[in-house]
Image: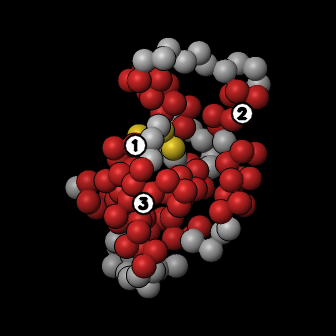
């Protein structure tokens, strides 16, 4: 699978969140996000202040998060291609590469899914 294919699959997967209000996405991310839970449990990982290790640690927190899609959708809506950090288990470079695909899906939501079938 090429990176272009991956971005299309992710954008298609996020279509189900298109009609969810932004404030609701924020509430879901704050309530169920693995990163929030780690900090709320008092066992927050210590940030090093060095970019690469901090982002790797954030990515690890995201890896098993139950609300990755909601988090990613929220960040794409709010920051667009000006995104920073790790959101939805994707570092900023990946989200910036993904953003045009996500935006295109928002502009043309009736396009077929990456598998060739109709969108949900």
Q: Position of residue 8 (x, y in %)?
A: 35, 65
Which residue has dot 1 on it? Answer: 92
Disc number placed over residue 37 in the picture, else none: 2
The answer to which image quadrant residue 103 occupies is: bottom left
User: Which residue is at a point 51% across and 64% down the rendered structure image?
Assistant: 14
Image-based side of 86 in relation to 111, left or right:
right
Mark 3 to mark 2 CA distance (whole Å): 25 Å
Q: Position of residue 9 (x, y in %)?
A: 38, 63
Whichever of callouts 3 and 2 sits on the residue coming sooner in the sequence is 3
* Crowdedness near tag 1: few (<14), some (14–19) or many (≥20) residues, C-alpha within 10 Å: some
Which residue has dot 3 on it? Answer: 10
**What colour scheme has been applied to the protein in the rendered image?**
secondary structure
Q: Nearer the viewer, residue 61 or 118?
A: 61
* Crowdedness near tag 3: few (<14), some (14–19) or many (≥20) residues, C-alpha within 10 Å: some
Whichever of callouts 1 and 2 sits on the residue coming sooner in the sequence is 2
Q: Is residue 36 above or below residue 26?
A: above
Mark 1 to mark 3 CA distance (whole Å): 15 Å
Which quarter shows the N terminus?
bottom left
Image-based side of 52 in relation to 4, left or right:
right
Let me know if residue 117 appears in the view.
no
Image-based side of 61 in relation to 43, left or right:
left
User: Which residue is at a point 42% across and 18% down the rendered structure image?
Assistant: 50
Mark 1 to mark 2 CA distance (whole Å): 22 Å
């Amino acid at each position: 699978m090429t990176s272009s294919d991956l971005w299309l699959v992710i954008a298609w997967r996020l279509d189900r969140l298109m009609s969810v209000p932004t404030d609701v996405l924020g509430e879901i991310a704050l309530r169920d996000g693995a990163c929030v839970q780690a900090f709320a449990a008092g066992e927050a990982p210590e940030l090093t202040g060095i970019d690469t290790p901090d982002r790797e640690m954030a990515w690890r927190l995201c890896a098993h998060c139950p609300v990755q899609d909601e988090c990613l959708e929220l960040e794409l809506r709010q920051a667009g291609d000006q995104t920073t950090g790790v959101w939805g288990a994707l570092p900023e470079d990946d989200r910036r590469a993904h953003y045009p695909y996500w935006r295109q899906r928002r502009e043309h939501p009736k396009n077929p899914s990456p598998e060739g079938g109709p969108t949900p």
